[in-house]
Amino acid sequence: MKIDAILLREVHLPLVCPFETSFGVTSKRRILLAEVQSEGLSGWGECTAGEHPFFSAESTDTAWAVLLNELGPMLAASSIEHGGQCPRLFYQVRGNRMAKAALENAIWDLEAQREGIPLAQLLGGVRDSISCGVSLGIQASIPELMAVIERELAAGYQRIKLKCKPGWDIEVFDAVRNRWPAITLSCDANSAYKLRDADHLTEFDAFDLLMIEQPLWHDDFYFHSMLQKRLNTPICLDESIRNRRDALAAIEMESCRIINLKLGRVGGFSEAIAVHNAAQERGIPVWCGGMLESGIGRSHNIALSSLENFTLPGDVSASARYWADDLIEPEVVVSSVGEINIPDTPGRGYEVRADLVEKLTVRKETIRALELVG
Ligand code: OSB
Ligand code: MG
């Protein structure tokens, strides 16, 4: 495909509710969008880097620099035909996986549009709808958390994930389990504990949690494998899994029994499919994580979740839980039984609201291949 131009933008979007994890509070997102224009079509990608390098080493600003100075020019000068060729194109650039994913995912979107098929189909998806859970940030008090859970259960969500950290764990799980003994419940520590907390973490087993997500270091397999031996509850790794090789190491070492698969964290659809397949072949279920994406990133998550081994509810939920006004049309809606239907129209299946995106844009750059003048 001939790449005519790559438009990079930073848009600012305030969250409907601030989101608190063990590493901080997010109230407003600074989101990078990549629009790849080719032969009259536009493919869209979203960079899932956070505002600060707290979840991973990337941030909105590092990704902007890498996209503008390195990856964008590489893509603009290329003659690739498929998103699956992006990893090799970007091979020289180490890390910066969220920046890479923004461009690779836009190419997959373009390719699906060009083929006239849904993105989910291009990826090899097998489902018409996906199961949804919610990730609930740390709240000011237990009664406030209880009210939020009540609302999300009434909305139909199939699994409640509680962000936790030392001081916001056992007491919280106890209150929630007393009120709702049978709901599907999990927790996510975002690396808030150390191996010396192992005795404390074994107490989590009393609450019949579906999983404990990333309790220890963000880059660790070995200590998680030692912890998993002491827990009945499955460990799920998020931050630690950067690629297929990490998934193989974690599975082999029994560092986890479940994998949270995030498109940006692994560098885009190619590697996400590779992680998905490696886990599936070894009997390890995956689910799709979220990074407080706008509707553009969310639509990619929906397509990815259509793959066969996404057998647990993901953190992909309705637009309205995050945004007063999402960047796409229609917005993402969740049914009363906690499902999102996978669009059956070409590409991502949600239109980008160009006027709104333009209004929210705070910086914009256009990258073009250098014209050879003869
Ligand atoms: O660890 O899954 C995480 C949000 C930002 C950074 C990390 C995580 C999260 C979430 C939110 O849990 C998931 C979502 O609703 O998008
Ligand atoms: Mg997580």
Image: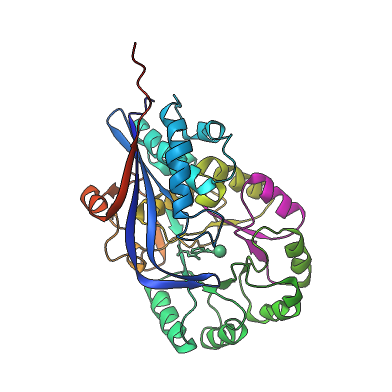
Residue 3 versus residue 165 in the image, above or below: above
| Image coords of residue 93 (percent x, y) | 56, 38
Confirm whether the magenta stretch covers residue 197. Answer: no
Q: Residue at 45% across / 45% down in the picture? A: 65
| Image coords of residue 301 (percent x, y) | 45, 52
Horizontal placement of 285 versus 138: left or right? right
**Start and end of the magenta stretch?**
233-262
Q: Residue at 54% across / 70% down in the picture? A: 23
Quadrant of image for the C terminus = top left
Residue 95 visible in the current orientation = yes
Residue 125 visible in the current orientation = no
Residue 171 versus residue 186 in the image, above or below: below
Image quadrant in which you'd find residue 184: bottom right
| Image coords of residue 329 (percent x, y) | 26, 53
Q: Residue at 24% across / 50% down in the picture? A: 358
| Image coords of residue 24 (percent x, y) | 50, 71
